[in-house]
Image (cartoon, helix red, strand yellow):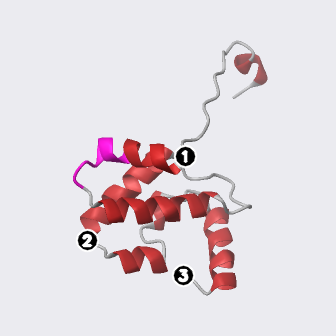
């Protein structure tokens, strides 16, 4: 947005939720999802957010969508632990997909 517009805005910054609060937020949107799936998905989500070169870190909304996709897909926990399925729900920039691919090569993950 242009600076002239932003000068007329009031900003309030909210700290990104810690994993415990994030789990509660997810439960509001997906109350029937298995706790083990939520826990593993949140762990992978925060790992993904920690990658240093991401241009757009996934947000709470993207996590909620991703957990819904994981549940509908019926994936087991090993699949989520070994790789990041339905990656398009979390990463929106091609450069971020490349960053994840480089990170996966370093760690032997997909």
> What's the residue at 26%, 57% (across, down)?
33
Quarter of the rendering occupied by the N terminus: top right
The vertical placement of 53 against 64, above or below, is below
Q: Mark 1: few, some, or many residues within 10 Å (few <14, many ≥20)? A: few
Percent from the top left, x then y, of residue 36?
34, 65
66 on left or right of 90:
left
| Closer to the camera in the image, 4 or 77 | 77
Q: Nearer the viewer, residue 57 or 29?
A: 29
Determine the residue positioned at 76% across, 17% down.
4
Measured in 3D between alpha carbons, the distance from the residue under mark 3 to the one under mark 2, in whole angstroms, is 19 Å
Q: Secondary structure at mark 2?
A: loop
Q: Which numbered mark, 1 or 2, is in the foreground of this view?
A: 1
Determine whether, in the image, residue 53 is placed left or right of residue 73. right
Identify the residue position indicated by label 3 in the image: 110
Highlighted range, magenta: 26-32
Up-down relation of residue 12 to residue 62 (above or below): above
Q: Position of residue 17 (x, y in %)?
A: 54, 42
**Residue 67 lies in quadrant:** bottom left
Residue 30 is a magenta residue:
yes
Q: Which mark is residue 18?
A: 1
> Residue drawn 74% across and 25% down?
2
Label whose residue precedes the other's in the sequence (1 or 2): 1
């Amino acid at each position: 947005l242009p600076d002239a517009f932003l000068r007329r805005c009031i900003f309030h910054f909210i700290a990104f939720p810690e994993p415990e609060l994030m789990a509660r937020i997810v439960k509001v949107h997906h109350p029937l999802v298995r706790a083990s799936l939520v826990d593993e998905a949140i762990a992978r989500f925060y790992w993904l957010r920690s990658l240093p070169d991401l241009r757009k870190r996934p947000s709470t909304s993207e996590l909620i969508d991703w957990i819904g996709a994981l549940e509908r897909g019926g994936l087991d926990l090993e699949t989520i632990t070994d790789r990041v399925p339905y990656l398009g729900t979390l990463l929106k920039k091609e450069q971020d997909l490349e960053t994840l691919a480089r990170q996966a090569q370093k760690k032997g993950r997909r």
